[in-house]
């Protein structure tokens, strides 16, 4: 993928699609939105007005995108399509939700570009103007999101007007490039050590299973001094990185790496006591999830409160980290989403056949296993699927109840299979009597926006966010 950051006039950028920052009604009221309407002309404006008239203030909810043909006749001097998107209004007290909505702007616009087979797209600094999103934070969200969601779009441009915004994006891209280069160099260095490492024999030197670079002394079982002295979060960052490198080779390599790294887990205990009750003095409610709960979920789940969780691509694991924040030990509070993801990868891969049998009824809605675990699951801040849900109860020794809204009606396969489903941990000797004493977590499949109603019909709905449900006191 080629990424370009430049100063200029986005309305005149020649590419497959330009992204137009607008408001929820899509009525342009100044700024770049009006400039793009003036550049594209009446044909584009009429399309936007038709949608705006029908849906009014819900024409394009925050974080969503809509695609339009730029001109009635192809103009080689302008973009072919205009993708309208609505960025969040940044407020310090709600910056986590603003970050989630900004990420959604990039995700939904790239999804449309991929759906229409477009290869090039140009962005402004979404929300950095009148909506006051800090440029450095906005740049970080934009750069990370296009990296993870570009797919067939191989030419992404940021066409920016303000010099300070341009400088912020350049600085963030420079930092990001340096980070990628460091990771690549680390991979090359690891491979170099592996190629020069002697063939295993009874007298061969043992290496640290985590960094695979340092020799182990006779009294060291798994980790070298450097890795042993690293913080818990640093250890599991390396841990997940090792799983990702192995996954890039093959599923078999990933499985071997899981077997190699599994003993490290015993060095870091994981006591887990999830929070059960909503406390308004410390918890923030998710009002959108609450709307799904009250309007689209079964009555037995409505006497609960959805707790807001950061939507940075890690919302599934953020849920369990946040619920565990009320745990009884200091060690438990140091657990990160990266650690939970790494533990879950190992648990799922090494016990995959047990889970496939245990949840055979879900086979029709599960992603292809090897493709998912070697692609999405081993990457931090990436999409979590139903597979993640199967094994997390074993990792945390809890029960999980999934709550799925019937936005698409009761005939929706996902609603039928997932709503009210209980996910239990794998237990030794199948001793189900101990399940009754385990804590229970209710997990709502939610979305960053309310369902879109088009002339009385709701568009086909798919969730993009996980939210825990807490009991009301």
Image (cartoon, rainbow, N blue to C red):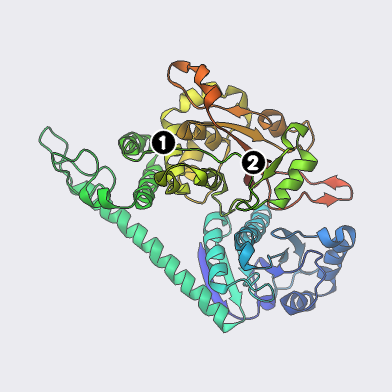
Tag in front: 1 or 2: 2
Q: Is residue 133 left or right of residue 41?
A: left
Q: Residues within 10 Å of mark 1 (few under 14, many from 20)?
A: many
- Along the viewing direction, whichever of 314 and 397 lies nearer the viewer: 397
Furthest-bottom residue in this view: 163
Q: Is residue 124 left or right of residue 170?
A: right
Q: Which is more N-terminal, label 2 or label 1?
A: 1
Q: Confirm whether residue 77 shows in the render.
A: no
Q: Residues within 10 Å of mark 2 (few under 14, many from 20)?
A: many
Tell me the residue that label 1 is attached to: 346
Q: Confirm whether residue 141 shows in the render.
A: yes
Q: Is residue 92 above or below residue 341?
A: below
How far across and down, in percent of the image, does residue 147 sit? 52, 59
How far across and down, in percent of the image, does residue 434 sit? 50, 21
Q: Secondary structure at mark 2?
A: strand
Q: Which residue does the image show at 24% across and 40% down from the upper left?
A: 222
Q: Is residue 198 above or below residue 36?
A: above
Q: Which residue does the image show at 81% across and 69% down from the upper left?
A: 44
Furthest-left residue in this view: 203
3D distance between C-alphas at marks 1 and 2: 28 Å
Q: Secondary structure at mark 1?
A: helix
| Image disc number at residue 426 | none
In the rendered view of the protein, which quadrant contains the C terminus? top right
Q: Is residue 50 above or below residue 403?
A: below
Tell me the residue that label 2 is attached to: 470
Q: Which residue does the image show at 43% across and 20% down from the upper left?
A: 428
Q: Is residue 153 above or below residue 236?
A: below
How far across and down, in percent of the image, does residue 369 sit? 51, 34
């Amino acid at each position: 993928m080629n990424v370009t950051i430049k100063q200029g006039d986005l309305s005149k950028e020649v590419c497959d699609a330009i992204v137009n920052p607008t408001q929820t009604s899509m009525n342009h009221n100044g700024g770049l939105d009006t400039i793009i309407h003036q550049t594209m002309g009446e044909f584009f404006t009429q399309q936007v007005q038709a949608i705006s008239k029908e849906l009014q203030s819900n024409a394009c909810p925050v974080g969503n995108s809509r695609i339009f043909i730029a001109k009635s006749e192809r103009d080689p001097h302008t973009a072919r399509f205009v993708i309208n998107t609505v960025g969040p209004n940044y407020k310090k007290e709600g910056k986590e939700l603003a970050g989630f909505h900004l990420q959604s702007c990039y995700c939904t616009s790239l999804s449309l570009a991929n759906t229409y087979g477009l290869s090039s797209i140009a962005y402004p600094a979404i929300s950095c103007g009148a909506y006051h999103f800090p440029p450095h934070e906005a740049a970080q969200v934009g750069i990370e999101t296009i990296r993870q969601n570009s797919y067939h779009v191989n030419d992404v441009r940021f066409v920016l007007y303000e010099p300070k915004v341009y400088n912020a994006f350049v600085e963030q891209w420079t930092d990001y490039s340096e980070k990628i280069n460091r990771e690549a160099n680390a991979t090359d260095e690891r491979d170099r050590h592996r190629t020069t490492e002697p063939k295993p024999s009874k007298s061969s030197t043992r290496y640290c299973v985590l960094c695979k670079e340092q020799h182990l002394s006779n009294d060291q079982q798994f980790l070298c001094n450097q890795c042993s002295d690293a913080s818990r979060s640093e250890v599991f960052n390396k841990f997940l990185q090792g799983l990702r490198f192995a996954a890039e080779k093959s599923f078999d390599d990933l499985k071997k790496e899981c077997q190699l790294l599994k003993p490290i887990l015993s060095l870091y205990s994981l006591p887990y006591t999830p929070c059960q009750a909503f406390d308004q003095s410390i918890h923030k409610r998710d009002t959108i999830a609450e709307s799904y709960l009250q309007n689209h979920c079964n009555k037995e789940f409505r006497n609960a409160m959805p707790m807001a969780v950061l939507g940075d691509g890690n919302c599934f694991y953020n849920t369990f980290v946040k619920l565990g924040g009320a745990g009884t030990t200091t060690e438990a509070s140091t657990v990160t989403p990266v650690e939970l993801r790494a533990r879950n990868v190992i648990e799922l891969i090494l016990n995959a056949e047990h889970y496939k049998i245990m949840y055979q009824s879900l086979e029709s809605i599960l992603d292809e296993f090897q493709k998912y675990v070697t692609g999405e699951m081993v990457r931090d801040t990436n999409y979590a699927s139903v597979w993640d849900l199967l094994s997390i109860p074993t990792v945390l020794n809890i029960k999980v109840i999934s709550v799925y809204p019937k936005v698409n009606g009761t005939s929706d396969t996902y609603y039928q299979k997932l709503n009210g489903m209980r996910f239990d941990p794998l237990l030794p000797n199948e001793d189900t009597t101990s399940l009754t004493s385990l804590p229970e977590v209710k997990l709502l499949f939610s979305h960053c926006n309310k369902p879109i109603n088009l002339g009385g019909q709701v568009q086909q709905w798919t969730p993009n966010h996980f939210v825990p449900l807490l009991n009301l006191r």
